[in-house]
């Protein structure tokens, strides 16, 4: 049973000052991921490594699974820590490691050594050779293969020694918090949770906004969005979910504008409102789950018409994905089952039978002029009555 893990991370682009920011963010995200697990852990950072030590009994499977959700982790290595690095003791303990980990030792192996402590009297190549020989002595059934060994026994000697042979892949990406913050437009669908996950994987912290239209959309539809935010937060960390009451704005657009333009005008108001909330909360961009051509409001012309009201960048990470590609990720991150629950969505209720698929921005702007009388006030009320839910 392992009492510790060595965490490996990709080192590209984290030279100099960025490195410590990256490592601190990674350490914080690891602590966050482990907080709900039964067991006490100590996360430490030393010499370009992050170690997690269990201070109590803990659930191994659950712990590995939680770490596999921490962006920035390239690999998780369950490790045995040896306090006394004197050569004879090291030989004995590495042998014990092999004995405990591999009941059946009919395999080829190789010792890979790293001497982090340059004071240590034996150099890395000699650790490899001498340790390999010592293991062969103790376990004659094992064979050395330096080219393609079945098992690589890694021995790192620092002020303690660390032995591991198992390398469990992490999710990759960058630790959340190393790349600013963005505002996700989160609906109850399949695409937007995936979009949030993808941007958060690049180290971006996310908050979210949901446009709710009671009584046309129910409490259960809202709860579904809260549940989706919670599923995404398993990867992204806590999300502030801003719930905007959109009913009066939608009804007003419905009353004043041509019905085939409803969706596009409604989406332009969603973007405007999301952008105001984003700017007020230090978000550097918006995120949506749009994909070219998926529906009428996602043709190139429609996307241009929604984009035209945005002054901050809009990130659409699934823009070139087929639905199935998006579904595959939704299944992987466990949002799919929740996304397909059949609750109404504010876009579908007010949708026209034949929405424009090639909106002309000039025409849309002219239709929006019909809203001049009351729209500013309705938007202000919507912003003033936001309910913010801290999802974690
Ligand atoms: P999704 O599966 O994410 O709901 P969709 O294919 O249903 O996407 P649309 O309904 O056209 O597509 O929405 C496009 C994007 O606009 C969504 O991905 C989401 O980012 C945003 N969006 C749509 N409806 C809402 C809403 N009620 N609240 C917040 N954002 C929304
Ligand atoms: Mg939708």
Image (spheres, grey):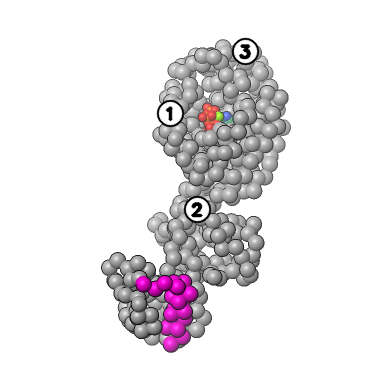
The percent position of residue 245, horizontal first and vertical second, equals 68, 29
The mark found on residue 71 in the picture is 2
Q: Which residue is mark 3?
A: 256
Front residue of 251 and 107: 107
Q: Regarding mark 3 in the picture, which secondary structure is present there?
A: helix
Q: Which residue is mark 1?
A: 292
Q: Regarding mark 2 in the picture, which secondary structure is present there?
A: loop
Q: CA distance from mark 3 to mark 1?
A: 28 Å
Q: Nearer the viewer, mark 3 or mark 2?
A: 2
Question: Residue sitting at 53 percent across and 35 percent down?
Answer: 190
Q: Earlier in the sequence, mark 3 or mark 2?
A: 2
The percent position of residue 58, horizontal first and vertical second, equals 61, 65
Q: For residue 287: magenta?
A: no
Can residue 17 be seen from the camera position used here?
no
The mark found on residue 390 in the picture is none
Question: Residue sitting at 48 percent across and 75 percent down?
Answer: 100
Callout 3 touching callout 1 (CB < 8 Å): no
The percent position of residue 336, horizontal first and vertical second, equals 54, 39
């Amino acid at each position: 049973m392992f009492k510790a893990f060595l965490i490996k991370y990709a080192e590209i682009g984290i030279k100099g000052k960025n490195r410590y920011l990256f490592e601190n963010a990674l350490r914080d995200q690891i602590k966050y991921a482990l907080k709900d697990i039964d067991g006490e852990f100590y996360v430490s950072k030393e010499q370009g490594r992050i170690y997690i030590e269990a201070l109590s009994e803990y659930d191994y499977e659950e712990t590995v699974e939680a770490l596999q959700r921490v962006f920035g982790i390239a690999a998780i290595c369950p490790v045995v820590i040896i306090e006394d690095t004197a050569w004879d003791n090291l030989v004995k303990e590495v042998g014990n490691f092999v004995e405990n980990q591999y009941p059946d030792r009919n395999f080829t192996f190789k010792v890979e050594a790293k001497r982090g402590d340059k004071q240590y009297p034996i150099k890395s190549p000699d650790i490899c050779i001498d340790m390999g020989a010592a293991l062969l002595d103790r376990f004659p059934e094992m064979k050395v293969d330096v080219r393609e060994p079945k098992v690589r026994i890694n021995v790192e000697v620092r002020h303690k020694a660390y032995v591991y042979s198992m390398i469990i892949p992490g999710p990759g990406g960058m630790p959340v918090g190393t790349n600013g913050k963005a505002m996700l437009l989160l609906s109850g669908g399949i695409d937007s949770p995936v979009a949030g996950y993808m941007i958060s994987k690049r180290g971006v912290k996310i908050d979210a906004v949901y446009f709710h239209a009671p009584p046309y959309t129910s409490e259960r539809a809202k709860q579904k969005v809260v549940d989706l935010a919670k599923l995404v937060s398993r990867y992204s960390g806590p999300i502030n979910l801003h719930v905007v009451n959109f009913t009066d704005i939608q009804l007003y657009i419905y009353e004043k504008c041509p019905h085939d333009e409803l969706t596009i005008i409604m989406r332009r108001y969603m973007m405007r409102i999301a952008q105001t909330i984003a700017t007020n909360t230090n978000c550097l961009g918006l995120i949506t789950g749009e994909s070219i051509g998926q529906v009428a409001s996602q043709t190139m012309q429609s996307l241009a018409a929604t984009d035209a009201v945005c002054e901050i960048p809009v990130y659409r990470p699934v823009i070139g994905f087929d639905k199935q590609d998006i579904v595959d990720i939704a299944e992987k991150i466990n949002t799919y089952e929740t996304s397909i629950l059949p609750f109404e969505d504010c876009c579908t209720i007010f949708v026209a039978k034949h929405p424009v698929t090639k909106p002309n921005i000039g025409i849309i702007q002219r239709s929006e002029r019909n809203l001049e009388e009351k729209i500013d006030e309705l938007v202000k009320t919507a912003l003033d009555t936001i309910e913010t839910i801290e999802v974690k």
